[in-house]
Amino acid sequence: MQSERVLVTGAAGFIGSHFTDAAVAAGANVLSVDKLDYCGNLMNLAQVMEHPNHRFVKADVGDIAKMSELLREFKPTVVVHFAAQTHVDRSIDTPLSFLENNTIATTHLIEAVRLYYEKLAQDDKARFRFIDISTDEVYGDLDVNDPPFSVKSPFAPNSPYAASKAAADAFVRGYGKTYQLPVIIVHACNNYGPRQFPEKLIPLVIDRIRSGQSIPIYGTGENRRQWMYVLDHVGALMAVVKKGKAGAVYNITSGDEVTNLKLVRTLCALCDIVIAHPEGRSHAEKITFVKDRPAHDRRYAMDPRDVDDALGYRARTRLIDGLQKTIDWYLKNPEWLAAVKSGAYRDWVKRYDEK
C-alpha cells in the first residue's frame, strides 16, 4: 500500500482505528477523519498520531463542504468509509439519529466524493476506489437451518440501525451505477477485539465481570451470530484495497457462529481463569436473562468462502483465541475503559440493571 493515499472516515472508532494502524504500518499515507462522538476516541489512534504518514482531522462526514475541502487537499486514491453509529439498542431509542448519521451523512459524503472524482485526471480515476463498510444485518433474519446469506441476498432490515445501513448502501450503489463511481460495498459479521466500545456484548460482559455486576442476556440467549476478530476483518479489508473490483460486494465473515448464551458462557469460563470470583464460583452464575429487545433477529450468517474465493483471504483467528486476546487486552488497559465510560455511558448502561 506504499503508493496509496487513504482517507479513512470513522478512524477513531473501533474497526476504523485498527484499519488506520494497519494502513500506516503498510506504508500508506493516511488522512483519518472522525467527529469524535461518544464512541470516537483519539486514544484509539495513539499508535499513529505522531507518525509522519498520518494526519488526523476532526470533521463530520456529513459536512459536504468540509469533506470536499479535505478531498481536494489530500487527493486520496482510496476512501474507506467506517463512520457510523452501530449499536442496535441505541437505534431503537433514537432512530432519527441513525438516519442522520448513517444514511444522510453517507449520502453527503458520496456526493462530495462524486464532485471530487469528476475532476480527477483519467489515470487518477482509474486508480480511485470508494469502499463502504456495512453490516450483515442489512440482509435480515435467518432460521437456524437456512443457508447463509450471499452477496445476491436481498435486503430485509429489521431494526432502525440495519435500515439506516441498507439505505446508505443503496445510495452508494446508486451513485456507483449512475455516475460510474468505482464503489465497493463490504458487509461484515460481528467484530470483536481490543478498543471496542463497551456497549457491545463482548466488552460489556468482560467489564461487568470485572466489576462484579450481573451479566445481561436478551431473551433466552438463543440468537445466533458470527464473530470475527477485528484484525481478521482488517486483513480482509486490506485485501479489498489491493484486489477489490469496482462495483463488487464482499461479505466478510469468519464463519464462527454461536448463540449469544454460548458466547457469554465461554467468556465467563475464560474469565474464571484470570478474574477470581469473590466466592470461588463461576462468573456464569451472574448471567441474567432480561426482556428481549424489539425485532431481535434470530440469526445472521454469511459464507466465508465468498471473500476467500474472491480475494484469497480467510480469517485466521479461532474464536476461543480471539476471545482470550480480547480479555487480556481489557484487563491490561483499565485506563482506556475508565476514560470511555463517561457519565453518559453510565446512565445508558443502567438499563440492564432496571430490566
Image (cartoon, helix red, strand yellow):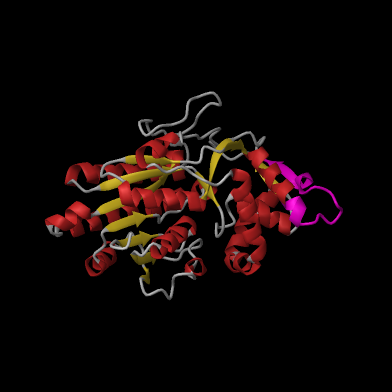
For residue 19: magenta? no
Q: Nearer the viewer, residue 108 or 320?
A: 320
Q: Quadrant of residue 329?
A: bottom right
Magenta extent:
271-290
Q: What residue is shown at x 39% (from left), y 65% (from top)?
A: 24
The spot of residue 101 in percent (x, y) is: 39, 55
Q: Quadrant of residue 166?
A: top left
| Extreme-right residue of the structure | 279
Q: Is residue 82 visible?
A: yes
Q: Is residue 132 left or right of residue 253?
A: left
Which quarter shows the N terminus?
Answer: bottom left
Q: Is residue 343 left or right of residue 122?
A: right
Q: Is residue 255 left or right of residue 259?
A: left
Q: What residue is shown at x 31% (from left), y 47% (from top)?
A: 243
The spot of residue 158 in percent (x, y) is: 47, 36
The spot of residue 87 in percent (x, y) is: 51, 50
For residue 280: magenta? yes
Q: Is residue 262 above or below residue 239?
A: above
